[in-house]
Amino acid sequence: RNVALKQNTTQSSTYRNWGSENAVNGIFGTVDGSDEVQSSECSRTNDGRWINGYWRLSFSEPMNIIAADIYNRRNPSRKNCCEQNLIGFTFAVHDGNYKRLYSYTDPSYDPLDIYHVPFDQSHSSSIIKQAMKVQIKKTSYSSSLNLCEVVIYGDSHCQPGKFGRECERDCNCVDDQEACFVATGGCPSGCASGYIGEDCWTPCNIGCYGFECSERCSDHCRGLGNPCDPKNGACINGCSPGYQPPLCKEVCHKGTYGVDCAQSCSEHCAGPDKTCNRFDGRCDHGCDVGFAPPFCDKVKATNHNVCSFGTYGPACERKCSSHCSGPNNNCDPTDGRCEEGCDVGYQPPLCNKVCSFGTYGPSCERKCNSHCSGPNNNCNPIDGRCEQGCDAGYQPPLCDAICSFGTYGPSCERKCSSHCSGPNNNCNPIDGRCEQGCDAGYQPPLCDAICSFGTYGPSCERKCSSHCSGPNNNCNPFDGKCEHGCDVGYQPPFCDQICSFGTYGPSCERKCSSHCSGPNNNCDPFDGRCERGCDAGYQPPLCDAAIHSKEYEVGYPIDEATGGNSRPYGPLKDCRIRGWFGNKCQYKCHCASQRYCDATTGACPNECETGWFGFACQYVSATFTTADSKNLWSLRDRDHNTCQRVYTGEDQILIKLKEIFPVTWLRIVGENAEHISKIQISINAQSVSCRKAKVNFKTVDFVCSDSGRTKEMILSNLGFTKVCEIYISKGKSAGLSAWKEPNLSYWGVTLPHFARPGEEPRGKNVLVSRKTSLMMKDERQV
């Protein structure tokens, strides 16, 4: 069913009355008498002019979609007017949270009337589930986007027993009265006998049949691989001689023989039951008087009785072959032909030669199996045994049957690994591959080796956490537990989660100090630093050592004049606790080689600690990429003249920090502060509220609520603005600390020499509000 029909649509712009809804109105862009497409039949955007045209569709509820067709605009009388505008388009599908589920870019060089979007070529499944939004975007700036119809096939309500785009396919379910999944054909009750797969439309492999293809076709089904009906096991090509249909598992009834037991023994076979050989119809007990062997279906000639039994020739001077069948090895007295055939292993007519290569049995009437190893597939001329063994996948002695469950290889001499998944640990009979995968801890294809370093689980498909301790981040190959413990900051057994509140260090074995300030006495999960400071009387960074006199307390730095504790707003020179700064010694220096920083500004005498930069080493390094992993290097080159435009199709910037970090504010520099201020921010996949201040016409500061455990951030709602640089800090923004109201706009902000930590000093202390003029002279108020 076309689930796009009459759905809600939008587009980047609209040319006249060529609205976006025309692309889902069920009219496919027919051409009128003037070779023109009517505006009511197609959608169209304005020409580009530096804007990528796009068309969007929103489903009213989540959809499972399986295919899409896009109908191009055609104008026969105006060649190259419009149809080429769709070349190179992109087609993207998103869920309700704007997470991209699928993306496709058209590779064609010439325009097509209909574009078929190939879901099954670049997606792990041919079904895209829980789709809520679809976007089609052109790639050139100068042309308009023309769509005459967008058809998306997905979930529909078919009558019981049907599924598919137009409900044209039959369900194959165990319960033939139930409705299968309309998008996939899958069945709640499982697939009917003879079928497997997500859509229950994949027939069993040759040689198998029944529910979940778990039963073997009879070895006596005729044809390569013993093919049978995948539903009921009936042999498709009939039975080998001696076995009766349909399953070819039972021998012929008395009185019948041959292929499918379709022939009757001669009524002149000797014996009480008139039976014959069930394979070839020979009368094993001889013939009634007057009838000739071996089939007893002809009257016996009497003019051959010139020679005595066992001789032939003009003077009866020759002996019949000792391998002639029948009493006394008798043969035709004229030419020596063995009238009742030859013994097993000898070939007619004289039965004096062993069967030629590739044949065996009575009168050499049977052929050696094509899976006998060796030249010409030769076998024992008497019983057909393949004396040089069987090809891989076939079992001796006749090599006419596939290896039994649990064996594989030449002559089925090898055993499948006991770690193959599935019933009986079965594997491919030819090469031993475990076709249903491996048990946990063993790697494909043979499941005979434990997972290589760094992997675990069924078929070794999972990766050990990169935070497992020990060489190669190795873990238990069966359950993924990190046997050598976890890296600093991660908790066992899988080392995939950061330490819970109140713990830190290798495998989270250490407890944060009970004197850490803040809820739950929480600390940095890696080094145990109390990020919100210490209780009174304890010194940072770990808050595990008491300060025995007031002069050592955090918040009382040294007074330059007296050498004692300073008074509020007193002149500062140094803090008692080295490596900290601020009017209360509350901020940590980030200088190289553990050097001290300026007690007021945090500025370092030489270089910053690795991963930090800025006047006061207040900004932390990070990587910036688009949603499709394109590296936005220009956002961290500290050059405000190299900017990056992030288009709508890539409407996100991903920021990844090298370690867990307590982000408190961001500065974003772009081409337009009005546009920058509309950017939305999420931290660790959670939306957060932010206060904003415009520093100048290109720069905006954001102060966002943060848990203190930021690992990654996402900037969205970028529109078409250019972003030139992004700074990240855990200090304070001078522009935002003076006012508490959110979303105030400030223009012409310049920063004082004694700015708060985290802000770069650049001039006089002046802030001018858009609404009121305000001059601030006291530097410590900023």
Image (cartoon, grey):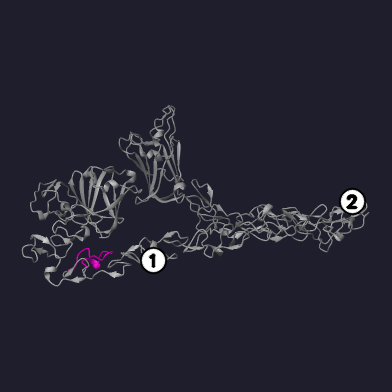
Q: In the image shown, does 402 or 412 lie closer to the viewer? A: 412
Is any part of residue 553 visible from this angle? Answer: yes
Asked if the residues shown at circle 1 and circle 2 are in contact, with their CB atoms under 8 angstroms apart, the answer is: no
Q: Which residue is mark 2?
A: 334
Q: Please, what is the three-letter code of the amino acid marked with disc 2? A: Thr
Which residues lie in the magenta part?
Answer: 516-535
Specify few, some or many for label 1: CA neighbours under 10 Å numbering under 14, 14-19, or 20 or more. Answer: many
Q: Is residue 20 above or below residue 638?
A: above
| Callout 1 secondary element | loop
Q: In the image shown, does 572 or 676 lie closer to the viewer? A: 572
The percent position of residue 527, horizontal first and vertical second, equals 26, 65
Q: Is residue 564 above or below residue 140?
A: below
Q: Please, what is the dominant secondary structure of the magenta stretch? A: loop
The percent position of residue 610, horizontal first and vertical second, equals 25, 56
Q: In the image shown, does 133 or 506 lie closer to the viewer? A: 506
Q: Is residue 461 left or right of residue 365?
A: left
Q: Which residue is mark 1?
A: 482
> What residue is at 8 percent from the left and 49 percent from the top?
775
Q: Is residue 316 left or right of residue 405?
A: right
Q: Is residue 526 magenta?
A: yes
The percent position of residue 645, horizontal first and vertical second, equals 29, 43
